[in-house]
Amino acid sequence: MIINQTALWIIFGVCLFLFCLGFLYRILIWMEGTGGDGPKKRSKYSKFVKCMSLFCRALFSRKAPAMIKSFFADGIVHGNLMRDSILKWLIHMFMFGGLAGFTLITILHVIAIAAAPNTIIDGSGPWFVTVFGTLENRFTTIVMDLSKLAILGGAFIAVMRFMLLKKKYKSVELKDKSAGVIISTIAIFSFIYEASFFLAKGTPAAKAAFAPAGYVLSLILNFIPGVNWSILAAIFFYAYIIALFLFAVYIPYGKYSHMVFGPVVAVYNKLSED
């Protein structure tokens, strides 16, 4: 599989910069809606500095345990959503928990490939490259596959729930359906990358089986004659990482911003209560 390491660094660097810029952009918009509209109205920048100061003081005070609890219970696990509907909570945890794991392992995978000495990934390289730089590593393979299966599982549950709901509730219940379609499509691209990689490398079943979906797909695709699997693997590698990174970059700017700012809002609300 031919990969341009310079291109990977450029793609990752540009997307990381745009994501951080979007994060700051969303924070500043949020600051416009906070207090301080009296005679001495503060700018959103001063509000941001004040909130960061408040956060830092609370982090090293007796409020820290409550903040950490709120961050995980309300921002990550979404206990409030679970109390409202276990099924909705399950869909959310599958899809967005899977997306978080998928994005993290993809970032590590991309960095490891880009950092591989002379693009060679074998047992003699640095441990980081050896672990995350190839789908023949069982840890990387199983994390990548299971996170994508969680995404598709959440999408499947959401579709089944949609079909069983009464008509008047459908538009409300699937307000995030576009995110589910985009994420699921990216996951499918990655499955094809996995399968093509296994076929191009001739990965033994003992290793490939740790990516159950990718391995089964490789067995099916193997019946297609005359395909250059190395080229196809490279095509779908770029397709899935670019699509995933662009989706991640869009999150702070668009209607999916709650995916990133849920934990931030949970902590802010906890500080506001006190």
Image (cartoon, grey):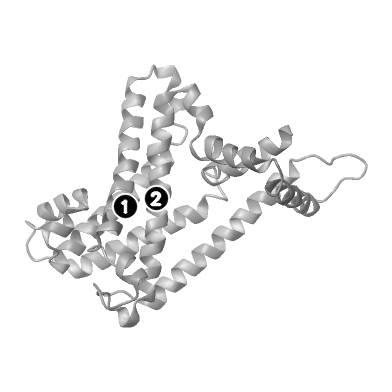
Say whether marks 2 and 1 touch (CB < 8 Å).
Answer: yes
Amino acid of disc 2:
Gly
Q: Which residue is mark 2?
A: 101
Residue 244 is situated, as x and y percent measured from the top left of the image, at 40, 55
Q: Which residue is mark 1?
A: 143
Q: Residues within 10 Å of mark 2 (few under 14, many from 20)?
A: some
**In this rendering, position of residue 263 left or right of residue 192:** right
**In this rendering, position of residue 65 left or right of residue 219:** right
Residue 46 is situated, as x and y percent measured from the top left of the image, at 80, 53
Instruction: Residue at the far bottom: name it.
Output: 118
Instruction: Residue at the far front: name it.
Output: 62
Distance, label 2 to label 1, CA atoms, is 7 Å
Viewer-closest of 56 and 32? 56
Residue 117 is situated, as x and y percent measured from the top left of the image, at 34, 81
Q: Is residue 158 visible?
A: yes
Residue 260 is situated, as x and y percent measured from the top left of the image, at 54, 47
Amino acid of disc 1:
Val
Residue at (91% x, 45% y) in the render: 40
